[in-house]
Amino acid sequence: MTDTEHKSRQELVTANHILAREGVMDAFGHVSVRHPARAGHFLLSRSRAPELVQPDDILEYDAEANALDGAGQAQYIERFIHSEIYRVRPDVVAICHHHSPSVMPFSVAGVALVPVYQHGAMIGRHVPLWDSREAFGDTNMLVTNGAQGASLATALGAHWMALMRHHGATVVGTSLRELVFRSVVACKNADYQYRAMALGPVAGLTEGEIELAAKVPAAAIDRAWDLWARA
């Protein structure tokens, strides 16, 4: 294993712990990072509660979401979310799927999630809603195969986040740290929007504000990472 891959695995463990402690994921949800040497492959934990993930839990998956190691270990059923988004989004380096209590009301009600504060701009101008019924009818709500993952990837398109009807959300980033930052602030944004809607109509940021505020410096992302990773 190269030093680069070792670092990717260690940071993925930290990402799991941060996203659990910040309330983005609980016993469920998962986060992955593209393999640093094999672009079609990705790293993802075996099926385990994110807060408990350790380096030995991290597995390598190929482009079809087949685990190349960890024989006999339980795997996340929804690993196809990751394989299919990586397939069509070469700019994406990390992915998180979660069911945060802050975001779930929007995926249930079908209400548009819009940026309402500075860091919320990182969710982008538009957060699409993927409805699995359109292509697959009634399901158990999980993304259990490549076709369903590909449908979600199509709905996500070039955006940074997609709501999943009655299911949660999937968030992507151009680096693992950016992905973690976006996932955390998206949940904060959803909470702020939900509270503001109780007071009256919410317009959100302008397109110009979104474009400017979404350019969060790497130093700011690292500052947040260092704080969240301290425990």
Image (cartoon, rainbow, N blue to C red):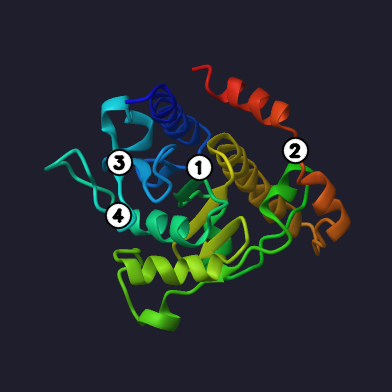
Name which residue type carries label 4.
Answer: Ala
- Decide: marks 1, 4 in contact (CB < 8 A)? no
Return the disc, 2 or 3, that comes first in the chain's sequence: 3
Residue 24: image tag = 1
Eyeballing the image, is 110 above or below 223? below
* Circle 3 residue: 60
Side of 102 relative to 193 (left or right): left
- Decide: marks 4, 3 in contact (CB < 8 A)? no
- Provide residue 210's location: percent of width, then percent of height: 80, 53
Q: CA distance from mark 2 to mark 4?
A: 32 Å
Mark 3 or 1, which is nearer the eye? Answer: 3
Residue 198 seen: no
Return the disc, 2 or 1, that comes first in the chain's sequence: 1
Q: CA distance from mark 3 to mark 1?
A: 23 Å
Residue 35 seen: yes
Eyeballing the image, is 98 above or below 154? above
Which SS class for mark 3?
strand
Q: Nearer the viewer, residue 4 or 192?
A: 4
Mark 1 or 4, which is nearer the eye? Answer: 4
- Provide residue 217's location: percent of width, then percent of height: 75, 33
Name which residue type carries label 2.
Answer: Val
Name which residue type carries label 3.
Answer: Glu
Could you classify mark 4 by the number of other residues whose Cα lies within 10 Å: few (under 14), some (14-19), or many (20 or more)?
A: many
Quarter of the image with the N terminus in it: top left
Mark 2 or 1, which is nearer the eye? Answer: 2
* Circle 2 residue: 216
Which SS class for mark 1?
loop
Q: CA distance from mark 2 to mark 1?
A: 20 Å
What residue lies at 33% left-to-right and 31% top-to-bottom?
Answer: 53
Side of 69 relative to 83 (left or right): left
- Decide: marks 2, 4 in contact (CB < 8 A)? no
Side of 106 relative to 168 (left or right): right
